[in-house]
Image: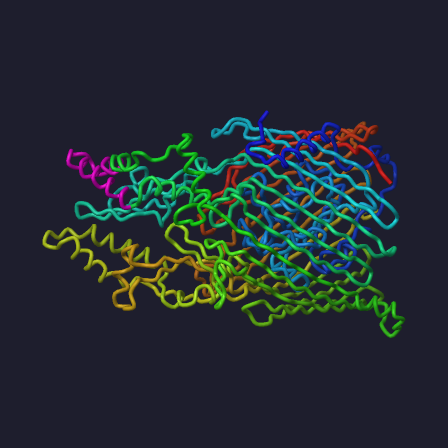
Amino acid sequence: MQTFTRGQPKWRIAITSLLVAGAARSEAQMRPAQAAPDTVPPRLVQLQEVVVAASRVEESILQSPVTVEKLNARTLRLTPAPSFFDALEGVKGVQVITPSLGFKVVNARGFANTTNVRFVQLVDGIDNQAPHIGGPIGNALGPSDLDIASVEIVPGAAAALYGLNAINGLANFSTRNPFTAAGLSVQQKTGVNHLNDSNVGVKAYAETSVRYAQVLSSKLAFKVNGTYSRGYDWIADDQTELNPTGNATTGLLGADNPARDPVNSYGNESSNRLTFRRGGKTYSVARTGYDEQDVVDYHLQTLKADAALHYKPGPATELAYTYRLAVLDNVYQRSNRFQLQDYRLQQHALQLLGPVVQARAYLTRENTGKSYNLRSMAENLDRNYKSDNTWLADYGTAYDQTIGAGRPVAQAHAAARLAADAGRYQPGTALFSRKLSELQNINNWDLGAALRVQANLLHAETQVDVAEALRRGRRTWLPANVDLRAGADHRTYLIVPDGNYFINPEKGRDPLRDNLVYGKTGGFVQAGARFFDQKVRLTATLRADKNDYFDLRFNPRLTAVYSPAPRHNFRVSYQSGYRFPSLFEGFSNVNSGQVKRIGGLRVMSDGVFENSYLRSSIDAFNAAVTASVNANSSTTLTPAQKQSLAIEQNKKLLQRNPYTYLRPEQIRSLEVGYKAALLPGGALLLDVDFYYNAYRDFIAQVEAYVPKTPNPDSAAIYLTNRSTQNRYRLWTNAQTRVYNYGGSVGLRYERAAGLLAGANATYARLARTESGDGLEDGFNTPRWMLNLSLGHENVYHHLGFGLSYHWQQHYSSQTFLVSGEVPAYHSLDAQLTYVVPQPELRFKLGATNVLNHYYTSFLGGPSVGGLYYLSVSCLVSKLR
């Protein structure tokens, strides 16, 4: 068994010991083990289920005006996934990518990436994003399996109601209320992964959870949750060559290419390539770099806990305070991959829920701890033992000696690298570990790799059911079929400048001492009514948001639901939504590998857009210059003259940067759908939807370099030399207008206390682009995804089972890290459950990717194999 206490502080070991001790008695939430006999008439399975996320009001799932998917408690019990969060991959319309065993990203309807800021995750209506990222880190700050009650997912734009950049969708995780779910529950999961993994042997996985809830009186209750998980992460070891033609003009290809750049090898990227000239030829040479496995610790662990105090001032009103804490060691990915180490998230939340007024206020605090950037770590390990200039000089000396001995050019390059790498830090040695620790604490990515961010998010919102308030005030003029509500919210981000990742750019402010503040205020009004004997429901919503640095923006939403019969419902909706730049996109200020990444707001990048040239055109220009020099066989021209002639011949390839400062991203979406409960009791649920989206002003990145000269006539000369240009990676808006469409169909059959079966298929298509510049985030979405599921809780003497199958088509992926084709993959998950009625024990033997066919869900990410586990859950006591 693995030991998972590496370097843990005493407080964490103490909490872990308590959790493990509790797990000796085992458990999870349990329902009564004795299932009703199959002869019981089926209940109205689907007709009674309600949702909230689609309209911010409780409503029948059948009559929701937009697509909404719900996972209830029974569905979650039957899933073979090791957690409720992993089970989201089987939801209709949902795409999940896996950057890490402990970190998954949820998306819907296209344009996925590893930090999806277009899809929002809520826990009981509270945003659980990491503030500086602008998106959640998986379920790090979310509920445990013991405390989850249900999940609602709204694929598609929801910004008109929520205003949280939810232009691709949102998920709301509802937790168990201590007033209705009291008692002590414990759960222990133990498993293994990395079977038949050539990189490592079999590794252990374990997760321990405890939930305790108590009703103190008719007005007061509380609950406490704790989860500690540990394991060994999936490994990213893609050796696909990203620069195969880097030296094609000299005939050096494949293993002979001195500018090789494998996907999961860092320190040999484009910014780490050097120009090497010999024998009238120009070569591109990269530093050697390190594989990801060399610079990351794949042991992962997550400790998360929460506590909530609930108070009922009246029978229909509840006031709750919740505190959440998460401490992570994990692998995380955005443009680069990161080692999260002692990464901490905290959240304080206060909620008032009543029939007229609902209000929330919460503070989320983020501290990246001892985390670091894997690419910067590899780059600076190379440069720490030998500078670029020294390394290239040693390379040249060895190259000349090898050529002088009559050896071929390819062998000369190989010998030159071997000589230049003499003394290089070797993974696994004490010196390497010491240097890695030193660089981990240097908060400058040109010299070290530390990620040292402290960020805070302060949010307050309220929603008023105006119609209910008027009726309670005996205003009888408002018809009973009319719904009227309004809401408002304010959000402020506060960042502590670290001098590397963030500074305060405002005039008159100390860039390293004064906190950076970024906020927005918004609100909505919604009116709806039912007509024609409740068969037609119309709703109109208008939202307005004012964000710092941007003008007021309006988002309308119009919906209609036609229900010719209670079990048959047709819906149509039109809405628009805006996504405002996240903190990272607007204000980043990072020196990384001699390229400075800066936010796209004018306050951060004033003057850069106007004076820069596109890196893509500079690369093409320099490649053409190199090809011209290498093809010039003149014996009368000096190398410098050949270079000048090539520059003059090819400078027309240079293109001025056409992009400018950030604007909000926008979507317009039209959706139609049909949902029906068929068969007696509504046992078969059919749901069909189709959508058409139009996007513009995608927020994306562009690399552009500024020559260090005020004379544009000399720009070409300056752009051939890295030392005579300033290199930038800028956040901006694509000039592309993008249209995409798609749809999904789902069938779900459920018998009360019996069989549960489901099938769904999702289709997503990039329709066309106008004024396409290729800068927008790639669509990064399979055209087809298919999910099948089958389960029964008590098929024979308390023995149950669950099966889940996922298949997705290959797709083209475009990201800043790597672009290419993601292969199709399929995965089968399975579980067997045995319930012991007294005490209430549930044994669950399960596996994800049970056939252990390794796959990658996105380029640059890890290979995901099978995870095999045993979960033991016990409801130790029921308390009143």
Give the residue at the far top of this rendering.
1
Q: Quadrant of the C terminus?
A: top right
Residue 152 is left or right of residue 473, and the answer is left
Examine the image and state in which quarter residue 539 appears. bottom right
Query: Looking at the image, which is closer to me, 191 or 433?
Result: 433
Q: Any magenta on residue 154? A: no
Q: Main secondary structure of the magenta part?
A: helix
Residues shaded magenta: 389-414
Query: Looking at the image, which is closer to me, 495 or 860?
Result: 495
Q: Quadrant of the N terminus?
A: top right
Query: Looking at the image, which is closer to me, 529 or 871?
Result: 871
Give the residue at the far bottom of this rendering.
477
Residue 345 x, y percent position in the rendering: 61, 47
Residue 295 x, y percent position in the rendering: 45, 38
Q: Residue at x 52, y 40 (%)?
A: 856
Is residue 536 visible in the rendered image? The answer is: yes
Residue 31 x, y percent position in the rendering: 81, 37
Q: Is residue 572 above or below residue 19?
A: below
Q: Is residue 299 above or below residue 783?
A: above
Residue 355 x, y percent position in the rendering: 82, 60
Q: Residue at x 53, y 49 (%)?
A: 114
Is residue 532 visible in the rendered image? The answer is: no
Query: Looking at the image, which is closer to me, 437 or 205?
Result: 437
Examine the image and state in which quarter residue 319 appears. bottom right
Q: Any magenta on residue 410? A: yes
Residue 635 is left or right of residue 516, and the answer is left
Residue 7 is left or right of residue 753, and the answer is left
